[in-house]
Amino acid sequence: MIALRRITEPVNQPVTLSDVKMAGRISTSAHDSMLAGLILSAVDVVENHTHRAIITQTWKKTVSDYGINNRKLPRPPLQSITSVKYMDMAVTQQTVSSSIYQVDTASEPGSFSRLPGQIWPQIAPGYKNPIEITFVVGYGDDATAVPAMLKQAIIALVAHWYSFGVGEVIPDGVKRALDNFVVRYELEEQDEFASNTKNQGYGVYL
């Protein structure tokens, strides 16, 4: 079982009100509040469609074991891992030493894996999702780090909604642009040892 939630919201947005008004040739300020709301909605739609995070934000993922799929971190691009915590055999939450694992920020989705010669700490048996991973994702802290096509897609989506209403969530032209950024998650099978030792309190070498 996997639980996932965002715990720190982005401080900035990938596009500004001025960007949208310039693209839509909107000269009045009467609808600024509505446009600001549409920007927030458009960012949510784009992130959910592409399975990405745009501006820096922090997420927490809780999982049942150290299996391969559980170590993949959604909402790329991955920037860093803040912590990996687990429930030990004394049913006390501990933090996995960062000297045990390596972080892959180049792949999409990003992930972490055990370093050679290291072993994952033992986890308490019988608890649901005893492992908690806190990680930071997004292209950067502000719009300068965001790919131009993603910013243009958000602007186009807001302009479309402003002109025609929100009945059509993503117009075909915008969807084609966003499809270039969709992250495909490939499932991998856990090895036999991991499957046999899942939640039994053993240290595993995955």
Image: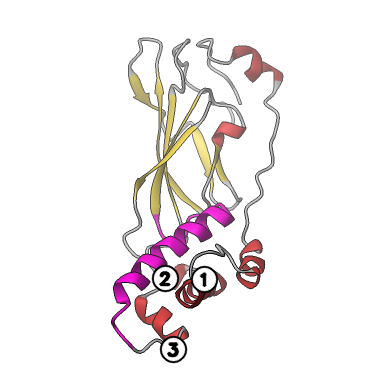
Residue 141 image offset from top left, x and y in percent: 37, 63
Tell me, for residue 40, which label it has, or none: none
Q: Which residue is mark 2?
A: 143
Residue 69 image offset from top left, x and y in percent: 61, 33
Cα–Cα gap, marks 3 and 1: 14 Å
Residue 76 image offset from top left, x and y in percent: 53, 52
Magenta stretch in the rendered image: 28-56
Q: Secondary structure at mark 1?
A: helix
Q: Are marks 2 and 3 in contact (CB under 8 Å)?
A: no
Q: Is residue 112 left or right of residue 177?
A: left
Q: Which residue is mark 1?
A: 157
Cα–Cα gap, marks 1 and 2: 17 Å
Task: Tell me the chief SS of the magenta region.
Answer: helix
Task: Say whether residue 40 is magenta.
Answer: yes
The residue type indicated by label 1 comes to Leu
The residue type indicated by label 2 comes to Ala
The residue type indicated by label 3 comes to Arg
Residue 197 image offset from top left, x and y in percent: 60, 13
Image quadrant holding the C terminus, namely: top right
Q: Nearer the viewer, residue 171 or 146?
A: 171
Q: Secondary structure at mark 2?
A: helix
Q: Are marks 1 and 2 in contact (CB under 8 Å)?
A: no
Which numbered disc, 1 or 2, marks the residue closer to the eye? Answer: 1
Q: Which residue is mark 3?
A: 25
